[in-house]
Image (cartoon, coloured by chain):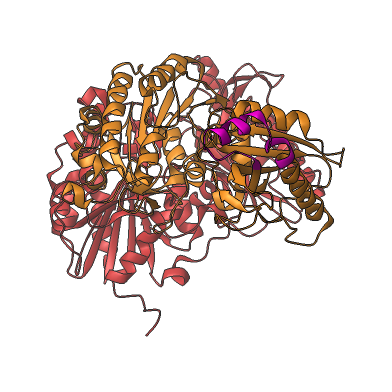
Chain colours: A orange, B red
Amino acid sequence: MSAIMIVLDGIADRPLKELNGKTVLEVAQIPNLHRVAKNGMLGIFDPLNVPGRRAGSDTAHLSILGYDPYEVYTGRGPIEVAGTGIKLEKGDVSLRCNYCTVDEKFTLLNRTAGYIREGIDELEKAINEEINLSDHDVQFTFRNGADYRCVLHFRGKGLSANITDTDPWKEGAKILESQSKDGMPESIKTSALVNEFVKKSYEVLNNHPVNVSRRKQGKPPGNLIMPRGAGNTPEFENFYEKWKLKGAVIAGISLIKGLGALMGMDIIEVPGATGYIDSDFMAKGQKAIEILSQYDFVLVHIEGTDEVSHDHMIKEKIETLERIDLMIGWVFDHLPDNTFLIILSDHTTSSALGKHTADPPPIMIFGPGIFKDDVQLFTEREARKGMLHRIKANEIIPILLDYMNKTTKFGA
Amino acid sequence: MSAIMIVLDGIADRPLKELNGKTVLEVAQIPNLHRVAKNGMLGIFDPLNVPGRRAGSDTAHLSILGYDPYEVYTGRGPIEVAGTGIKLEKGDVSLRCNYCTVDEKFTLLNRTAGYIREGIDELEKAINEEINLSDHDVQFTFRNGADYRCVLHFRGKGLSANITDTDPWKEGAKILESQSKDGMPESIKTSALVNEFVKKSYEVLNNHPVNVSRRKQGKPPGNLIMPRGAGNTPEFENFYEKWKLKGAVIAGISLIKGLGALMGMDIIEVPGATGYIDSDFMAKGQKAIEILSQYDFVLVHIEGTDEVSHDHMIKEKIETLERIDLMIGWVFDHLPDNTFLIILSDHTTSSALGKHTADPPPIMIFGPGIFKDDVQLFTEREARKGMLHRIKANEIIPILLDYMNKTTKFGA
């Protein structure tokens, strides 16, 4: 028995004025999601296991996969870094960064270097080749993420993530010096390394041909790397050790790939998976079915729905969901016997606020032994009437394991 | 005000192919259970207080009666022993045993001595009379349970249950020597006593007339006692002290009698209560009504429904339930005023798997002050729509105490 879990990031919403008090799930044409609902068991769940707490996608996924985010989460930095393919070790320090634009006095002029995209491969290469840190016991790796986003990773003895950010979050302000938060030698050393890296990034980037060309085109140059959110390597129990499920992750964004990698799951690349609404959803669903025979648990993560919610793009959220629904239909039609299908939203994202909210999102489970309940629609309002009632995110995998008959009883 | 709680062990099930996706509760003719449902308040509950965990009948009952099984449960052995009427004390070690068949080299030939039943009273007597342990500071008591099942109890100074089993679980294998798990003198002493008892049981039993006669009939002799599952005496808080309810237990099986005895409840014997589907259910229900004036809380446990579920006997599960329903009707019709009736399944037993599963079973409460909710049927699917929602097993007694007006408020 195996299972596919499809997470529609932030698809759950609040009632929207623009939709006459209905949600995106309630107005979109999604016959296939409703078909799964008719045949499955529904409910709602609290992403952080208690009502009223807003979850990030990372903490929600940790919780859904049965980990306690309050215990194991060390920040987004290390997860993003792991998602770029770097194998993190204990003692490493990981940071998220932006390419940004500064003047010669390190005044921040543009936090994203004008959403820089072209030429970043060359900039990445130059940084890794030309920067040498004065402390030769510490190695760094710099990697591009999507567009202006990038990551910085340090490995060496005596490092600590207990340091402040360089990002002032405000254009017109000076780039901050990273500082030790605790006065310990490890964090003093690490903050000095970060500051050295930042200065040297300017030396490498400011007159790099890519930036010379950007200036000519009137675009802000990506002439400095601005790190923030330093984090230690989290210690996630291996997913297989924890649940005895051989797991794989299909995702477009490095955050979810990183979570999977840190849990020891296989990361399956799918051409066309972008992490945005232009992603090839069908390819992701087809890949899940294709690899199912090699795994017990395949997580398919769809990011685009959350992105457009943050940007208040209701129409695009509906259209994206309707395209996703076609993939759901294909997966449902090609689901082998003895396979479970779980579909859920990892958290609610209010398209009105452009933010994650704490409303408990819907979940549905289909598969052998599952009760069909009365619920006919995969919507926030209907899912709440389902047989699962209101559960906690960290109860989802145990419930699945019970249906997969992979659990033992306590007692006689 | 008093209360009768009727536990239909393992009556909750999953949708069954053989019943066109319905459950036993959904197809059986049970007008009386549905009559209680129409007049009561329904819900579902998680036997181990969290979704997704499979409970045994012992741990589920502990939880339902408000005890934390993760804290107080020390295994099935001591509970079974207590259920045979032995009054356990702190420091005792209790084991479950089988009569089994071995050859002269202690190779296990038959784990149940061919489901031995006849003559076991004589064998029990011989063991207790003829075996003398070399350590005269330790007393043992040996008692028959049902059929080939029996129990062994040690009392004396310096004993420990931290020892391994003698049961290899596989016919053709040698009977195992019990060994200390921790290398401490207490467990070394106890394992030696167990091994001595096992050897001496062979000396007493092998040529016992009962076994001579069985051999002549071509039946495997019950020529060795094979202990397993050693457990220390659990420390259950006294039920009356805990809840201020004077309690009684009506049950056919020693497991539930033992739980009641260890909680200090009175164990009420009912002629014809067998712990199987041939039990006199009506006699148990009538006894509950008969003794109600002397107690605040009477637990009636029905085992047969679970037994047939483990054996995939769907037809027998339905027939048994329909006979139980007649008893429910009688009890409901004879329920005195100011009396509560609680009916529940202690856990789900899937007749398809033949195993306990973690699906939350239904519960209903009838009595003064209780809301009648919309639910008309005592089934898994309908109970989930009731006013109790999804509760935890350890919340049942507090809810009952509230309706019995035996609780005080916290605050002013």
Residue sitting nearer the eye, A32 or B175: A32
Q: Is residue B55 in view? A: no
The percent position of residue A267, horizontal first and vertical second, equals 55, 25
Q: Nearer the viewer, residue B244 or B151?
A: B244
Quarter of the image with the N terminus of chain A is top left
Question: Residue B118: where, in percent of width, then height?
Answer: 46, 30
**Residue at x 63%, y 28% (from the top left corner):** A85
Residue appearing at x 82%, y 51% in the figure = A189
Specify whether B282 is left or right of A245. left
Quarter assignment of residue A3:
top left
- Report which quarter residue A42 is drawn in: top left
Identify whether B341 is placed above or below A279: below
* Above/below status of B342 relative to A326: below
Residue A92 in view, yes or no: yes
Q: Position of residue B41 (x, y in %)?
A: 21, 57
x then y, percent, for residue B238: 49, 66
* Residue sitting nearer the eye, A57 or B102: A57
Q: Nearer the viewer, residue A68 or A8?
A: A8
First to last magenta residue range? A202-224
A19 sits to left or right of A51: left
In the image, residue A96 lies in the stretch drawn in magenta: no
Q: At 48% from the left edge and 29% from the top edge, which residue is drawn?
A: A252
Residue A207: in magenta span: yes
